[in-house]
Image (tube, helix red, strand yellow):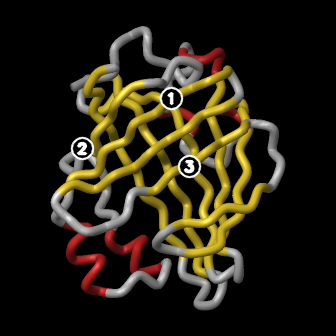
């Protein structure tokens, strides 16, 4: 389902489901991150759900679950002040991350595809790195028109610092309700 007009990055709370038909395949990213083939195979057959809350304008809490698999839920807490914070991921272990608001024109992403009317031309930028610096990822969150409908989209740029492999993927979400 398309994102309703009242949904913005400043009002993103709700339930969202990854639309695999509109998104790029994600298993190559998991491979770049060193996830074993068995987990990647399971992940390719699961539905990914987000439950997002927003206690303040500069704080986003996200719980990601995968249905139909024994993949642990992931909780992400983003405070948009560009300060590095340590965390622990059930799949990747020790992590560090930071987030901020960024103008579309300042983001290193396809600027012509983002909804410039939404959020005053801002995106959310999040960076996450595996603690041993094996890989790093930069996410840009915003809204785009995808196949004629307004959608919540994440653009993810990944690099494996050991092999030098790089990857860009688009993740498109359906809105499931409050």
- Look at the numbered disc 3 and give the secondary structure of its residue: strand
Q: Which residue is mark 1?
A: 53
- For the point 31% across and 44% down, the residue is 49
Which numbered disc covers residue 76? 3
Q: Closer to the N terminus: mark 3 or mark 2?
A: 2
The image quadrant where one finds the N terminus is: top left
Q: Residue furthest bottom?
A: 163
- The answer to whether marks 3 and 2 mark residues whose Cβ atoms lie closer than 8 Å is no
Residue 57 is left or right of residue 48, and the answer is right
Asked where in the image residue 106 lies, by quadrant, the reply is: top right
- In the image, residue 102 lies at what x, y percent? 72, 34
- The answer to whether marks 1 and 2 mark residues whose Cβ atoms lie closer than 8 Å is no
Q: Which residue is mark 2?
A: 19
- For the point 46% across and 56% down, the residue is 74
Above or below, 38 against 101 in this view is below
Which numbered disc covers residue 43? none
């Amino acid at each position: 389902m398309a994102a309703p007009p009242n949904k913005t990055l400043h009002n993103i709370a709700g339930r969202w489901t990854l639309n695999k038909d509109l998104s790029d395949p994600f298993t190559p990213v998991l491979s770049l991150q060193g996830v074993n083939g068995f987990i990647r195979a399971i992940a390719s057959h699961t539905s990914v759900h987000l439950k997002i809350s927003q206690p303040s304008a500069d704080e986003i809490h996200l719980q990601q679950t995968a249905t139909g698999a024994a993949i642990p839920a992931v909780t992400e807490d983003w405070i948009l002040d560009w300060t590095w914070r340590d965390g622990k991921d059930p799949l990747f272990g020790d992590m560090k991350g930071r987030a901020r608001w960024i103008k579309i024109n300042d983001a290193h992403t396809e600027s012509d595809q983002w909804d410039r009317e939404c959020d005053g031309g801002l995106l959310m930028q999040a960076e996450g790195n595996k603690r041993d610096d094996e890989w790093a990822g930069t996410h840009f969150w915003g809204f785009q028109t995808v196949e004629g409908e307004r959608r919540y989209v994440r653009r993810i740029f990944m690099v494996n610092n050991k092999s030098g492999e790089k990857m860009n993927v688009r993740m498109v979400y359906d809105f499931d309700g409050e």
